[in-house]
Amino acid sequence: MTVLVFFGASVLIALTPGANNLLGLHHGMTHGVRRGLAGLGGRLAAFTLLITAVAAGLGQLLAASETALTIIKWAGAAYLFYLGLRILWSTTRHKDDAAEAAEPPAEPASAWRVARKEFGVAITNPKAILIFTAFVPQFIDAGHGSFPGQIALLGAVYLLAEFLAGSVYVGAGAAVKTIKLTRRARRRVDRGTGVVLVGLAGVLATSNA
C-alpha cells in the first residue's frame, strides 16, 4: 500500500510542469518521439545518480550543505539561461519565410546531444535533490529492510513515474509536430519555450532552495 501511495504521489510530482518537462515537450515537437525519449533517458540517468548518492548516504550531506546547494542552484540557473538563449537565438536567424523554405532542412540534433541537455538540467536542479533527500525518505519504513535497499526500491518506482510523466510531455510535443506548423508558427513556439526557460532560470536563481 505504501508503495502504491508513493507511486501516485510521484506521478503527480513528475507531471508538474518544469524545466525538464518543458525540454521534453520541446524535443518531442522539434525532433520527434525517438530523440525526445533519448532526452528523457538523460534525465533518468541523472536521477539514477542522485538516488544512488542518497542510498550511499551522500544525499543528506549534500542537502545539508548550503554552499553545495547554492553552487548547484547557480549552475542550474546558468544552464537553463544558456539553453533558453540558444533557443531564442535560433528563432532570430531567419526572418524571411521564402528564403528559409529554400534552404535545406537543418540536420537534427543527435540523440546523445538531446540526452546530454536533459541530463545537465536534471543533475543541476536542487529541487530534484530535495525530492530524493526529503520526499522519498518519508516513505521509508524502518521495519521493512535496510535504508539503502528501500531507497533503491522507491527510487526505481519514482523513475517509473518520471518515465511515464516524461513520456506524456514528449508524446504531446510529437503530436504537435505531426500538425506540420508553419515555420513562423514553429518560431513562435520556440520563442515561447526560450522565454520560459530564461524565466525558469530567473526563478531558480532567486529561490531559496
Image: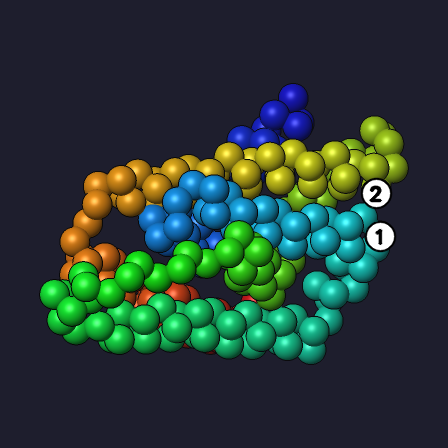
Q: Nearer the viewer, residue 95 or 53?
A: 95
> In the displayed structure, does residue 192 sit left or right of residue 116?
left
**Mark 1 and mark 2: Cα distance apart in space:** 7 Å
User: Tag 2: residue type?
Assistant: Pro
**Up-down relation of residue 14 to residue 206 (above or below):** above
Percent of width and height locating residue 87: 35, 68
User: Tag 1: residue type?
Assistant: Ala
Instruction: Check the picture and name the quadrant holding the C terminus.
Output: bottom right
> In the displayed structure, does residue 205 sit left or right of residue 189?
right
Q: Residue furthest right?
A: 146
Q: Nearer the viewer, residue 33 or 71?
A: 33
Percent of width and height locating residue 49: 72, 53
Instruction: Check the picture and name the quadrant holding the N terminus.
Output: top right
Callout 1–callout 2 Cβ contact below 8 Å: yes
Residue displayed at 34% across by 45% down? 173
Looking at the rendered structure, which numbered label has been put on residue 148?
A: 2
* Label total for image: 2
Question: Which residue does the numbered mark 1 point to in the structure image?
Answer: 56
Residue displayed at 14% across by 65% down? 97
